[in-house]
Image (cartoon, rainbow, N blue to C red):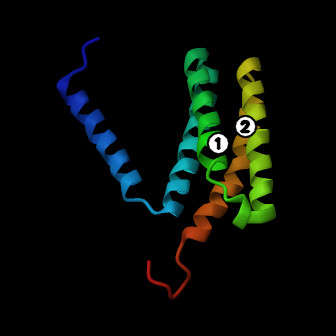
Amino acid sequence: MYTPPSLRAAMAYKNVGAQSSVEFASPHQLIDLLFDGLVVALTSARGALQRGDMAAKGVQIMRAVRLLNEGLKAGLDKERGGALAERLASLYDYCIERLTLANARNDGEILAEVAALIAPVAQGWKEIGRPSVGQPA
């Protein structure tokens, strides 16, 4: 398939921007990027399901599962995080199970459920990363 040079340039620019974001991000920002990617994957999966694009739905659900399992869950420090890390691991496992079921059943309601479960955790993560009043950014 032919890709116009302008589109190739735009895609390369996007890839460099994403790579730079990761290379220069703090550990907190990396988790923030994982949450952002997860929200995008869930939204994309729901859109693909609504359009009847089952291939794209499957790709996006698998992307969400990998972000949960290999990114967010793998990044938990259960020794220092204690009970909170254990509860987050349980939440991520539950979301992975639900996403697997959503994929098998083509169930948009389950995708919405997972998005609703992740949203407050992602928002809370963003909040703790913001400087307090009087602190430098």
> Marks 1 and 2: in contact by CB < 8 Å?
no
Quadrant hosting residue 63: top right
Q: Which labelled disc corresponds to residue 20?
A: none
Please state if 38 lies on the left or on the right of 83 as rendered. Answer: left
Q: Amino acid at mark 2?
A: Ala
User: Comparing marks 2 and 1, which lies closer to the viewer?
Assistant: 1
Q: Amino acid at mark 1?
A: Leu
Q: Which residue is labeled 1 in the image?
A: 68
Q: Position of residue 20 (x, y in %)?
A: 33, 51
Q: Is residue 23 left or right of residue 123?
A: left
Q: Quadrant of residue 47?
A: top right
View extreme (top): residue: 1
The answer to whether 50 appears left or right of 26 in the picture is right
Residue at the limit of the structure toward the front, as seen here:
79
Q: Quadrant of residue 49?
A: top right
| Labels 2 and 1: the sequence-earlier one | 1
* Farthest-out residue, bottom: 134
Residue 11: give x, y in percent of width and height.
30, 33
Q: In the rendered image, which quarter contains the C terminus?
A: bottom left
Q: Which residue is mark 2?
A: 112
Pinpoint residue 21: horizontal percent, then vertical percent.
Answer: 38, 53
Q: Residues within 10 Å of mark 1 (few under 14, many from 20)?
A: many
Q: Residue at x 66, y 63 (%)?
A: 124
User: How many numbered markers are drawn?
Assistant: 2
Q: Which residue is rendered at x = 46% and y = 63% of the image?
A: 26
Which quarter shows the N terminus? top left
Residue at the (75%, 53%) spot, across then down:
88
Identify the residue shown where x is 72% and y is 37%: 112
In the rendered view, would you say 119 is above or below 43? below
Name above or below for residue 7 compared with residue 22.
Answer: above
With respect to residue 127, does 112 lie above or below? above
At mark 2, the secondary structure is: helix
